[in-house]
Image (spheres, rainbow, N blue to C red):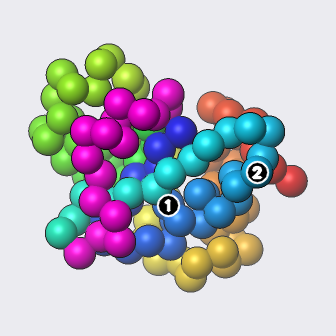
Amino acid sequence: MLTQQAAGVKPGLTAETMYQGFTGDAVKSAGTEPGARIRVNQGHIGWADMIFVMEKKHGRILREKFGEGRDGKELICLQIEDNYRYMEPALIDELKAALSGHVEVPE
C-alpha cells in the first residue's frame, strides 16, 4: 500500500508507522511536492497494490504525472487534510475510519 501526501509528512508517515509489522502489510509514504521527505516516483507506483492519497489534489497530481504508468491502479482519496501532528490520536482515528472501508486496520 502506498500512502501519499504533499510536502507535509504527518498523515502519510503516521499511516506508514501504524502499519509497520501489521498482518504482513507493507506501507510506504511519499509526497508530491519538491520539499517532500520522499518524493513519489514510478517505482513507488509500480510497487504498490493500492494507492491512497490524503486529498483530491494529490490524486490529480499523480494522474497528471504518472497517467498510464499507474497500470490501472485506483487512487483512493481518504480526504484527510495535513493539519495534524505526527501520530496525533485524532489523526490515527481519522485514518482508521477512512481506511477501514478498504483494508484491515490495526487496533
Residue at horizontal 23%, vertical 75%?
35
| Horizontal and vertical percent position of residue 40 | 29, 52
Residue 57 visible from this viewpoint: yes
In magenta stretch: residue 38:
yes
Q: Mark 2 sits on what residue?
A: 21
Residue at horizontal 26%, vertical 47%?
41
Range shown magenta: 35-50
Marks 1 and 2 in Cβ contact (< 8 Å): no
Q: Nearer the viewer, mark 1 or mark 2?
A: 2
Farthest-out residue, bottom = 85
Farthest-out residue, left = 64
Side of 86 relative to 48 (left or right):
right
Q: CA distance from mark 1 to mark 2?
A: 16 Å
Give the SS element for disc 2: loop
Does 12 appear above or below 78?
below
Circle 2: residue type? Gly
Residue at horizontal 50%, vertical 28%?
49
Does 30 appear above or below 82?
above
Circle 1: residue type? Gly
Q: Residues within 10 Å of mark 2 (few under 14, many from 20)?
A: few
- Which mark is first along the chain, 2 or 1? 1
Q: Mark 1 sits on what residue?
A: 12
